[in-house]
Image (tube, grey):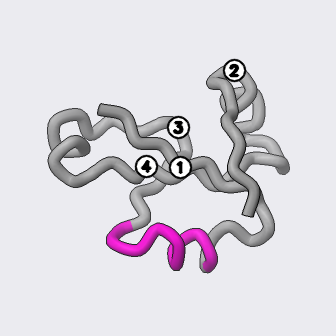
């Protein structure tokens, strides 16, 4: 698995397109409760983000973010 960074401008240009990545908000629950806003199209993967990504990415790139 390759790990790379993506800048916000590039990410937002991909959202809604056929090349859109799976965007996962992987913040801890406490951080999410403090600020429940998500990036457009992002999902909360639950306790096992790796398994969630395996089920839902369907060949797409994956973007995980955690901001505190």
- The residue lying toward the viewer, choosing from 67 and 42, is 67
Question: What residue is at 33 percent from the left and 35 percent from the top?
Answer: 37
In the rendered structure, which disc, 3 or 1, sits on the residue that comes first in sequence? 3
Q: Which residues are magenta?
A: 46-54
Q: Residue shown at 40%/42% (left/top)?
A: 66
How far apart, in angstroms, are the residues tagged by discs 3 and 1?
A: 13 Å
Circle 4 SS class: strand
- Residue receiving disc 1: 64
Q: Are marks 3 and 2 in contact (CB under 8 Å)?
A: no
Q: Nearer the viewer, residue 1 or 10?
A: 1
Number of the front mark, 3 or 1 = 1
Residue 44 against residue 58 in the figure, above or below: above
Closer to the camera: disc 1 or disc 2? 1
Asked if marks 1 and 4 touch (Cβ < 8 Å), the reply is no
Above or below, comparing residue 6 to residue 54 in the picture: above
Q: Does the magenta portion include 50?
A: yes
Q: Secondary structure at mark 3?
A: loop
Determine whether, in the image, residue 33 is placed left or right of residue 28. left
Left or right: where does residue 31 sit relative to residue 46?
A: left
What residue appears at the point 69 percent right and 20 percent down from the top-left corner?
Answer: 9
Mark 2 element type: helix
Answer few, some or many: residues within 10 Å of disc 1's Cα (few below 14, many 20 plus, some between 14 and 19): some
**43 sits to left or right of 12:** left
Are there few (<14), some (14-19), or many (20+) residues within 10 Å of tag 2? few
Is the Cβ of the residue at disc 3 closer than 8 Å to that at disc 1? no
How much space separates mark 4 and mark 3, taking CA atoms?
11 Å
Q: Which residue in the structure is indicated by mark 2?
A: 9
Location of mark 4 (residue): 25
Q: Nearer the viewer, mark 3 or mark 2?
A: 2
Neighbours of disc 3 within 10 Å: few (<14), some (14-19), many (20+): few
Distance between mark 1 and mark 4 Cα atoms: 6 Å
- What's the CA distance linking mark 3 and mark 2? 13 Å
């Amino acid at each position: 698995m390759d790990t790379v960074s993506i800048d916000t401008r590039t990410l937002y240009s991909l959202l809604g397109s056929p090349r859109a990545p799976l965007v996962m908000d992987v913040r801890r629950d406490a951080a999410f409760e403090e600020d429940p806003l998500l990036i457009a199209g992002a999902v909360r993967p639950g306790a096992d983000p790796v398994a969630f990504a395996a089920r839902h990415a369907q060949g797409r790139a994956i973007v995980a973010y955690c901001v505190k």
